[in-house]
Amino acid sequence: MVNNFLKNNLAILFGNVFFKIGGYIYKFLMVYLLNNYAYGILTIISPFQNILQTLAAGGLPPTISKYVSEYNATNQKENSYKLILVSIKIAILLGITFGLLMIFFIAPLLVKIYNNKSLLLPLQIIGLIVPFSAIVGVFRGIFQGTYEMTHILTSRAIEQITMILSAIVLIILGFSVVGAIFGSVIGFFSSLISVIIILHKYFLDVFQGMLKLKMDFKEEIKIAYKIISFSIPVILTTISEIGIYSMTTTIMPLFITISEVGYFGIAEPIARLPLMISNSLATTILPVTSEMFASKNTNILKKYMFNALRYNLIIMVPICLFIMIFSKEVLLVMFFTKPFYSKGANVLTILTLGMFFYSIFAITSSMIQGAGKPKSSMYLLIGGFIQILLLSFIFIPYFGVNGGAISTTLTTATMTLISLIYLNKHISLKFNMGHYLKILFAGIIITIFLLILPKNLIGFYIGLLFLFPIYLITLMIIKGFTTDDLNILMKIENKIPFKLTIIKKMIIKGTEVNFNEYRK
């Protein structure tokens, strides 16, 4: 049962992890190639790029995916073609409109607000990205709606690879942060070319179907209204999520220098690294929750939820504790050519705690959506957006860059607590809390171990070497494993060329159930 849960959406999971890693590689390369001031500019403008792309896309990809899959299932191909054609027109209109607004109005306005002319050209370049990204989103929605996930992966791979390579070349040629941002323009343009080629090669019927369509303006408006009505909650949710991640970096320049903002930008991707695990779990728990909730199979649903939260904790607790305690050493090791970046250690410690809370929220939010309460999840994100906005204006003036990290952590902690209370109220989780307490106890043990180590690179490497052995041994001693853990381990073992004998023995000894059948 749990094995099936882990096997769901394999293509999506692979894509999420692969492109998350690619995103981190891009950010780390930018940290190495740019100075702190230039990277501070990149950190400030990134939220504006993400928000503008979201507005220009108009929430079209999930909308197209939903309706295309529904129309194809009911053999309404003409309606599918109409929806796609209108979506392309909306994307072109919104992409060009928001691109021009960014270049001629929003960018100059932000320069006046921040009182910094060096932001103007980087902000204006964002306007060039928007039309390409909006149209690419439409095509990816088509691929998702027809379950052709490999085409999405292909277009994203082309986008990311060309973006990274272009940015590197342009920075080396002396274009600094402007080159880094223009790399995104080249990346999205390359992706647009790739999706057009894919659509023409594999979806020729869609091309031909759209060319044969005859729609009057009134019908187009009706379809556009249908698309936009469905897209609004998607847009609000996405922007709120971007705000929770990045709102502080848009407020910081009002109170601190751009170079100081750079320290936040350096710490953030490291703090978010462990989220790859929770995001993958959240992706798979959504359809499972929907299916189990619809079939009223409450017991199986609770088991899925229990394991999703438990596995998230098992992985996140040791990783986050290590990063928090050795934050300075983590920065020194990752950016060994720029030791002054270790000034962001306090930011990294605080942000890592915030991302720990967010990892739990990512899963509980998916559970809430899967339980048929998508608006509740949206309201939680909007509430978090408002909270972090208010807290940023309170803490950043007094605590500087650390204030931004504090605002983020308090917001994610609040969202997590509310989501757990809401989930328990509507689904009545009633989990065996003993399993979670055992994980937290193992966390306390490794915290003590890490704290007694010297806070230098020797202590860092000793901690890294013994972190998981001590953690797993502690879980074994306090019987912190379950039968599901062994089932999953054996499933993994069957697919790899070597045996996991030691870990298997630890899990068997660390479970209260008799496992004689597994010893054979």
Image (cartoon, grey):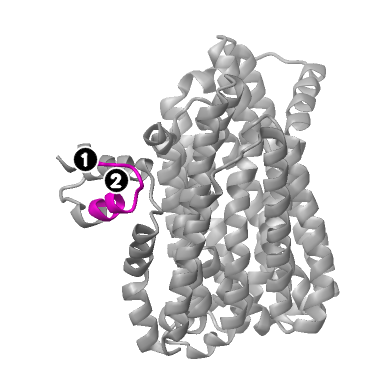
- As helix, strand or loop, the secondary structure at mark 1 comes to helix
The residue type indicated by label 2 comes to Leu
Q: Is residue 320 above or below residue 131?
A: below
Residue beneath label 2, please?
489
Q: Nearer the viewer, residue 286 or 336?
A: 286
Q: Is residue 511 left or right of residue 377?
A: left
**Residue 28, position in %: x, y?**
47, 71
Give the residues in magenta.
504-516
- Residue that badge 1 annotates: 516
Among the two numbered marks 2 and 1 on one chain, the one whose residue lies closer to the N terminus: 2
Identify the element where label 2 is drawn: helix
Residue at 15% across, 51% down: 498
349, 263: nearer the viewer? 349
Q: Quadrant of the C terminus?
A: top left
- Distance (Cα) linking label 2 and label 1: 16 Å
Q: Decide: few, some or many residues near mark 1? Use Cα within 10 Å; few <14, some 14-19, many ≥20.
A: few
In this picture, residue 473 sits left or right of residue 480: left
**What percent of the width, then of the height, locates residue 440?**
51, 62
